[in-house]
Every structure is written in structure tokens, then in C-alpha cells.
Amino acid sequence: MNQTIYDAVIIGGGPSGATAATDLALAGHSVLLIERGGRIKPCGGAIPPRLLADFDIPQSLLVAKARSARMIAPSGRAVDMPVGEIGYVGMVDRDEFDEWLRERARDCGAERLTATFEKIERDDKPHPIVTFRRTRGGPIESVRARVVIGADGARSAVARQCLPGAERIPCVFAYHEIIKSPPKNTDQFDASRCDVYYQGRLSPDFYAWVFPHGETASIGVGSANKGFSLRGAIATIRDDLGLERCETVRREGAPIPLKPLKRWDNGADVIVAGDAAGIVAPASGEGIYYAMVGGRLVAEASAAFLRTGEARQLRTARKRFMKEHGRVFWVLGVMQYFWYSSDKRRERFVTMCNDKDVQELTWQAYMHKKLVRAKPLAHVKIFLKDTAHLLGLRPATH
């Protein structure tokens, strides 16, 4: 039986897969975007202004603008970090945001298909075969692809099948509840503020959050501790903040990778992107911006492969990503390793967040997605303060 042959078949229609589909379609390639539908990833929904600019995202997709963040220590002490003149953190609802990205990909020429990916098969003909089912228990269908892009999330089926060692990627499990926002602001909930809880009782190894989404809010938590009750932690937060009576719109959970895969491609015709490639920022868990950057780089590498037939072109996606963001990931990984290991250290970490130099450089790095080098003396000051806190030479409530 003759199968349709696409230049690219993309498995997964989240921010990474949809971005790759858009870019490849705009470049004139035939693209099939397969999304299983009915699933929304648990996510705080924060995106920096750079994402809006780099990926031409309209302001209308923002459901809220956060003007500050509040860090809450194990003791309950809160440190406010106003965004200030830098701007705001945009908030999106992944249900609407991801669908808009998929529709844009279709408008740009990609074909959309709601189906569940089965596996990649091979025979004596050129190009791999991608199999899928449109309905549960329905017949298996297939197409061929010159390149397959796996953007199917953490613990990616594409990665597990095609990339050795991909199944061992470390993950935290994230869970959140979308609730109807309270009718008015209080000290405990502010529709223009993101709250981050560094408390062992709410997460023994990560953090919990309350992020505004306009008419709704995301209350979430992450942890790699399999014995820890994520639902229990959310119930505690809602009870503490007086949000237990707010209507629950939906509940979602999913693994979030903690480390980029050492290799994104199989050296032939398969490459992964986004969570499937492990590119979620350590410490913060931020993934939307990095997923879209990864999707764009994978699209560019795939286009070069399609143009030249050289499989080595696929390797350029990871190389370029790590060159641009690898140092930030390393710094955030060190932060998570040291500061999230105990409530004593979490208390000191929140204290450090009260420092104006730390706040300014943190926001600048977040907004621009790179380490800020404009103020070397400020970096020296922060390093010395950080070391003093880590060694316990400064009081936790300083």
C-alpha cells in the first residue's frame, strides 16, 4: 500500500511541536502535526516578554499580567519582588494558548490530525513509517516521513523508542488545580502577583505556586518524591489561603523533566524537542519559552537535513540550544541542588531574594533569557552574599 510521504511528521502539538510545525510549513515543507487532544499540561503559565516578541504572540492571549512575585519561606516570611520598570510577566492558560499555536501552524500550511501515536516502524523502503490510531481501539493507520519530530512531552514515546537512555531522564511530577479566582484581591491572593512557596511541607524537593490567570488561577506543586501527596499539598495551600471554596475548573498532572537529554537525534531521521528533549529550566520549572526555542531550533535543523540529506545537521539543534542556554541551566541546577535541599536553606534562599541586586539581575535574566553581564560588581556582591548564606555566615532573617 502506498503511504503519504511528508517532509516532517511531528508527534505532539504543545508549544514545541506547534512552533516546529509553523516554522517548517512557512519554509515550504509538507508537515503533519499529530496531537492526541484532550490533555492540558499542568503549568503555571508564565511567559516573558521576549517570548511574545520572538514568536509573534498577540497580547490577546494573555489572561493576566503579573507585576510582582512573592517568595514565601518555610517560616511564612514573605519577600516581594516587584518587576518594576522591566515590565511584567505575561500569564497564559495552556488550554487556549496551545490551541492557538496549533491553529497558527495549520494556517501556515501544516496539516492537523487528532490521533494517538503508536510507534515508528521501518521496512526496506526509504523513510520511517509513523503509525497512529484516530480513536481508541480503532484501526492502525500510517504515513511516512522524511524526518520525525518527537514533541510528545516528558517520557516521550518517540524518545524512548529511538534514543538510548531517554527512559532514564530524571523528572519531577507536577500537579495543579485551576480554580475560579476570588472576586477581589487580599493579602493572600493578588491577581497581579505570582506566589511561590519554598516550604518543605508543601514540597520536600521543589516548590508550590499560586499563579493568577485572570478569571482563574493555577495552584500547583512539583516533587520527585513518589511518596509525597501532591493533592494533599494543594488542599493545604487552598485551606491556608481561604481558597478551598473556590470552584475547581480542572485538575491536571504530568511529569516534568529536570535535565536536557545528552542527544536529541538518532543520527538518521528522528529528533525530539521540548519536554521530550528535557529542556525545562531547573529550579524554576519554566518550560514554555524553552520549548518554543527548542521547537524552532529543531525545525531549522530538520530543514537543513531535508535540504542536504545530511543527518549530521540534526545535531545542530542541541548544540545551538546548549550554547545559548546551557550556562543558565547549569546555574539553575546548582541553585536547585543547594537551596531546595532543606527548610533551613530555603529560609536563607528567600532571605537572599530580598536583596535588591538579586531582584534586579533575576528579573533581567528572566526577561531576556540570558545571564546579565552589564553589572559585574553586582554579580560579585551576589556571589559573596550567596556564599555567606550557604555557609551560614549571615542570619536567615537578615
Image (cartoon, grey):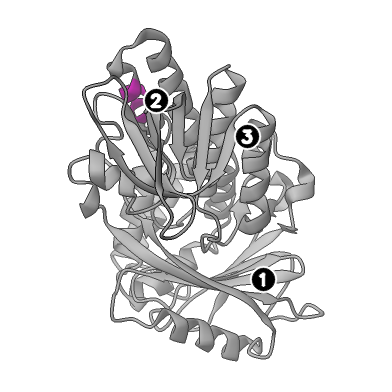
Give percent across and percent down for residue 357. Answer: 55, 51
The question of residue 156 being in magenta is answered with no
Which label number is shown at residue 162? Answer: none
Q: Residue at x 75, y 65 (%)?
A: 214
Where is 378 relative to 213, above or below? above
Residue 91 appears left or right of 338: right
Ranked by sequence position, the earlier of labels 1 and 2 is 2
Give, as a three-letter code, the residue at label 1: Ala
Q: Secondary structure at mark 1?
A: strand
Q: Secondary structure at mark 3?
A: helix
Where is 231 relative to 333, above or below? below
Q: Does the image show residue 374? A: no
Residues under numbered marks 1 and 2 in contact, where contact means CB atoms less than 8 Å apart: no
Q: Does the image show residue 173? A: yes
Residue 168 appears left or right of 99: left
Give percent across and percent down for residue 43. Answer: 54, 61
State the extent of the magenta-drawn residues as a range: 314-320
Q: Secondary structure at mark 2?
A: loop
The quadrant in which residue 15 appears is top right
Residues under numbered marks 2 and 3 in contact, where contact means CB atoms less than 8 Å apart: no
Ranked by sequence position, the earlier of labels 1 and 3 is 3
Give percent across and percent down for residue 197. Answer: 50, 74
Instruction: Compute the Cα span from label 2 to label 3.
Output: 26 Å
Instruction: Compute the Cα span from label 1 to label 2.
Output: 49 Å
Taking depth in this image into account, of 317 and 348 the one nearest to the observer is: 317
Residue bearing mark 3: 105
Residue bearing mark 1: 217
The quadrant in which residue 244 appears is bottom right
Residue bearing mark 2: 2
Give the foreground label among 1 and 2. 2
Give, as a three-letter code, the residue at label 3: Ala
Where is 302 relative to 264, above or below? above
